[in-house]
Image: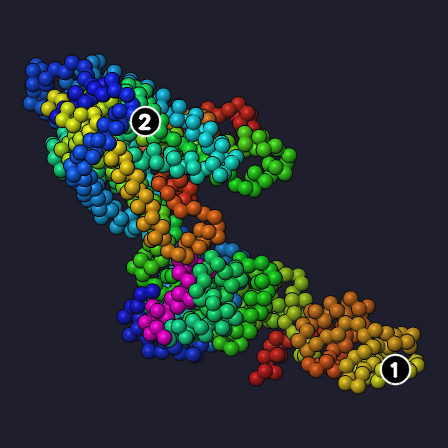
């Protein structure tokens, strides 16, 4: 691709690893000949390294808002600040070369190879050949595609691979901000789930600031550090963490949008590891027990404290049944308990040794805490 | 009429004898036919490509482009030459103008359709990554539009070479000169020139088809193989162009 | 110029210089009076001959192309050879093709018709096949699922849905044939090409050039308009907007014809 001198000269930190902060400040969009604005006074901030998901029904202006960040759509009023600097202060093409851009249809160039697709922006920025080659190799490894793929054409790889190449292409010049418009929208549910998880793992490493657009609330809850819920007419209704949006929907619209099962969705955000477990009474396998007051608490273990059986109501040993792990979500844990006649769930630690028991009422009480699992987990991480 | 008395075989045999005896003359006329057609195609390309690419890039004027193309099809080549005989008189200019007009419609229609129809996602991605509009046209739109554009250029060359013998009646020279001048060359000469120019037209089309193949980006060939889509060939009219363009332009 | 000899002789040609018409004597750009006074002797007959030539050629071409398209649709391996052969024919310059056919069929109308039919084939065949192939697979699948036989699918689904494409082909073929038929005058001295060669014989008589060319263009325009109108009658459901030589308003006016009774009752 072509090299443009303008782009080279005006960016001193073209390979900056840092993520950028983003601020929407009273942003409105009006189209000529249309009385109703497409976006109304949109204001919110995204901290560096966070994923902000814009979610809402079609026609809510979420894509418009995203496309204003890299000036694919002009701002009518207000401003968008990238690291405190207005996006309007930079020429559009130059600005866009430093913002990753992924769209639903991916838009790979069918006439050039995968490697050349990935190299698009580095070449626009005038990187030298060796650096471009090295970067392409690095990115192919990052998205776990074999290095032969670089010579392939987009028509020769699978849909999931194309999607990953799209992400790699957006990451190529290591932009501090990424815009992603329904990036997993056109992919089958199983592959989508895998790509979502892959991307979240990738984000652990790269820690980019990401604006992510979707119409799927479940995807928003899964991907977002913060979610901006928008409604028709370009109005931002609620901007908060997924947990607080589920725990405390601001109005009827949000409540409807997140669904009646928002409690269960909230459970999906927390993991057994976040919960204070009830202590289990671990007995060596084969120990005879008679007339125990709380037979549910008894777990028979082997010499490594791995669960091998449980105590039935009649005092006889029973099979151990389902077992939870620290990273099992509370939602899945609840499901396991209910499919196991409401017995408290045996939870094991990372080594498989019994850590404790999870009871339905303890899981339910996690919902009662206003600042539930997600935020608590963040606090714990700090 | 003159040669009707002799048998079919003899007539063709005589024309081959004419070719053998007048090879130099035929070659000379072939070169001037090629030069005339090439110049007309060149002018038609120079006049048509920039506005057609621009209109396609900005997705405007689909009605205009298709209408010009259809209007062009309705212009009889002989009628055009007649009109310019009346307006410009005998000579090179007349013939050039007529042949250029014959070549413009297919180039315009196919180029517009091709550039306008480039995957909008590829263009959006290119713009989103910070390519300049120039870069988008030259690095993304033109390579992707090339096969269909080339089909238009092939069609234009076919029309121009098809009309080129008619140029002789307006003083354009070339192989047509022999065909319209039976009194001097006899029917064997006329038939020889007709066969010669038919072969020339087929040869040129064959070469252009090879050139199209060579110019098509490899990635597009791979995609075509994967999707079973065929390389665009000679432009056969409205149905094809509209199918490719998906012509329902946004009502604006 | 030895055109008159080559064209096999034409009607007796008066020298325009000898005419009483001042404008014609001076070879003015367009002498309206000369045009109207020669309508009956030159232009009227040429126009009628031209229409007949084109009607015959397009009709025969359509029958052949339609049969070939059905064949290629049912047996796709036939498509490539048919396209190649008809493309080769389409590629040969008109003046040359007419002359190459002369040894076979002489300086006759048959020669002209054969050449014109050859030119139609590619345009009609490609458009008909495209139309048949364009039918969405899900529509065909639904028909199959409802128990229609392949024959019924062809007659009730594929062909009706291909009508717009078939008409597109007919329009291009008709307009092209009208254009090429002018060249046919070189062989038979019939049709709107005849006055053009005639004008050359008179020493480049401008009025005759312009009148004949204008009539040929007008004929193409009117024929296209009639085909658009005919499509509206044959396939009223195919109201998909198609570009046309005809201004949109005219198309709309033509489409605003009385609706079939069943449709009126429903409304």
Measured in 3D between alpha carbons, the distance from the residue under mark 2 to the one under mark 1, in whole angstroms, is 100 Å
B125 drawn magenta: no
Q: Which residues are magenta?
A: A106-130
Whole-percent x and y of residue A164? 50, 66
Q: How is the image coloured?
A: rainbow
Quadrant the N terminus of chain A occupies: bottom left
| Residue corresponding to mark 1 | A286
Q: Work out whether B30 lies above or below C209.
A: below
| Residue corresponding to mark 2 | C115
Label at residue C37: none
Residue at disc 2, secondary structure: helix
- Residue at image x 33%, y 74%? A128
Which corner quadrant of the image does residue A265 belong to?
bottom right
Pointer 2 chain: C
Quadrant the C terminus of chain A occupies: bottom right
- Residue at image x 52%, y 73%? A202
Which corner quadrant of the image does residue C222 belong to?
top left
Does residue A335 appear in this view?
A: yes
């Amino acid at each position: 691709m072509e090299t443009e001198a303008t782009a080279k000269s005006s960016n001193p930190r073209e390979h900056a690893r840092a993520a950028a902060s983003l601020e929407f400040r009273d942003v409105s969009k009006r189209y000529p000949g249309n009385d109703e604005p497409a976006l109304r006074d949109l204001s919110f901030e995204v901290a560096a390294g966070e994923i902000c998901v814009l979610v809402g029904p079609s026609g809510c202006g979420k894509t418009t808002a995203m496309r204003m960040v890299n000036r694919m759509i002009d701002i009518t009023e207000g401003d968008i600040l990238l690291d405190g600097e207005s996006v309007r202060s930079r020429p559009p093409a130059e600005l866009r070369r430093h913002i990753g851009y992924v769209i639903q249809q991916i838009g790979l160039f069918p006439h050039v190879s995968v490697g050349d697709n990935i190299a698009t922006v580095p070449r626009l920025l005038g990187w030298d050949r060796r650096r471009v080659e090295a970067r392409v190799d690095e990115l192919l490894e990052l998205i776990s595609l074999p290095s032969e793929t670089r010579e392939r054409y987009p028509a020769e790889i699978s849909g999931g691979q194309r999607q990953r190449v799209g992400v790699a292409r957006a990451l190529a010049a290591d932009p501090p901000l990424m815009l992603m418009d329904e990036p997993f929208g056109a992919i089958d549910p199983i592959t989508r789930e895998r790509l979502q998880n892959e991307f979240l793992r990738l984000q652990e490493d790269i820690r980019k600031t990401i604006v992510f657009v979707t119409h799927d609330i479940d995807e928003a809850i899964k991907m977002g550090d913060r979610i901006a819920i928008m409604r028709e007419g370009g109005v931002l209704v609620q901007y908060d963490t997924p947990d607080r949006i589920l725990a405390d929907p601001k109005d009827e619209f949000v409540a409807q949008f997140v669904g009646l099962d928002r409690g269960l969705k909230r459970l999906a955000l927390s993991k057994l590891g976040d919960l204070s477990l009830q202590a289990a009474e671990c007995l060596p396998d084969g120990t005879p027990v008679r007339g125990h007051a709380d037979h549910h608490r008894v777990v028979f273990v082997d010499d490594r404290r791995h669960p091998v059986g449980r105590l039935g109501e009649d005092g006889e040993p029973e099979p151990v049944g389902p077992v939870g792990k620290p990273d099992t979500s509370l939602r899945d844990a609840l499901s396991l308990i209910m499919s196991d006649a409401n017995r408290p769930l045996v939870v094991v630690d990372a080594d498989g040794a019994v850590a404790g028991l999870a009871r339905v009422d303890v899981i339910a009480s996690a919902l009662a805490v206003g600042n539930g699992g997600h935020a608590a987990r963040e606090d714990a991480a700090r | 009429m003159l040669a009707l008395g002799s048998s079919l075989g003899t007539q063709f045999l005589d024309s081959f004898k004419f070719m053998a005896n007048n090879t130099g003359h035929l070659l000379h006329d072939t070169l001037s036919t090629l030069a005339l057609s090439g110049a007309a195609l060149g002018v038609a390309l120079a006049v048509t490509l920039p506005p057609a690419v621009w209109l396609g890039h900005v997705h405007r004027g689909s009605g205009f482009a298709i209408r010009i193309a259809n209007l062009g099809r309705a212009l009889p080549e002989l009628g055009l030459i007649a009109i310019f005989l009346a307006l410009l008189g005998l000579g090179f200019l007349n013939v050039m103008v007529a042949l250029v007009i014959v070549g413009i419609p297919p180039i315009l229609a196919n180029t517009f359709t091709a550039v306008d129809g480039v995957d909008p996602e590829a263009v959006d991605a290119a713009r989103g990554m910070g390519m300049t509009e120039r870069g988008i046209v030259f690095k993304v739109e033109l390579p992707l539009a090339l096969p269909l554009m080339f089909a238009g250029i092939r069609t234009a060359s076919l029309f121009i070479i098809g009309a080129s013998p008619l140029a002789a009646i307006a003083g354009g020279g070339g192989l047509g000169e022999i065909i319209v001048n039976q009194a001097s060359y006899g029917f064997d000469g006329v038939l020889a020139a007709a066969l010669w120019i038919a072969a020339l037209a087929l040869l040129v089309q064959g070469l252009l088809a090879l050139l199209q193949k060579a110019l098509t980006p490899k990635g597009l060939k791979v995609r075509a193989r994967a999707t079973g889509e065929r390389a665009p060939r000679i432009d056969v009219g409205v149905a094809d162009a509209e199918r490719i363009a998906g012509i329902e332009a946004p009502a604006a | 110029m030895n055109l008159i000899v080559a064209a096999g002789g034409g009607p007796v040609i008066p020298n325009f210089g000898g005419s009483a018409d001042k404008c014609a004597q001076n070879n003015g750009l367009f002498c309206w009076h000369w045009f109207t006074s020669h309508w009956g002797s030159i232009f009227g007959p040429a126009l009628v001959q031209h229409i007949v030539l084109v009607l015959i050629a397009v009709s025969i071409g359509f029958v052949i192309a339609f049969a070939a398209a059905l064949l290629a649709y049912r047996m796709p391996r036939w498509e490539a050879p048919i396209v190649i052969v008809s493309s080769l024919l389409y590629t040969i310059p008109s003046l040359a093709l007419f002359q190459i056919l002369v040894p076979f069929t002489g300086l006759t109308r048959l020669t002209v018709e054969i050449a014109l039919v050859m030119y139609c084939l590619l345009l009609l065949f490609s458009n008909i096949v495209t139309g048949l192939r364009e039918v969405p697979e899900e529509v065909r699948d639904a028909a199959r699922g409802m128990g229609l036989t392949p024959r019924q699918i062809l007659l009730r689904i594929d062909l009706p849905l291909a009508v717009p494409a078939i008409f597109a082909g007919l329009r291009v073929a008709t307009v092209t044939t009208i254009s090429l038929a002018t060249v046919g005058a070189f062989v038979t001295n019939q049709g709107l090409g005849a006055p053009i060669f005639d004008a050359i014989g008179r020493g480049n008589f401008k009025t005759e050039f312009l009148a004949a060319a204008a009539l040929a263009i007008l004929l193409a325009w009117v024929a296209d308009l009639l085909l658009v109108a005919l499509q509206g009658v044959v396939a009223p459901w195919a109201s998909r907007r198609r570009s046309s030589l005809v201004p949109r308003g005219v198309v709309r006016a033509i489409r605003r014809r009385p609706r079939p009774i069943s449709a009126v009752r429903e409304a």
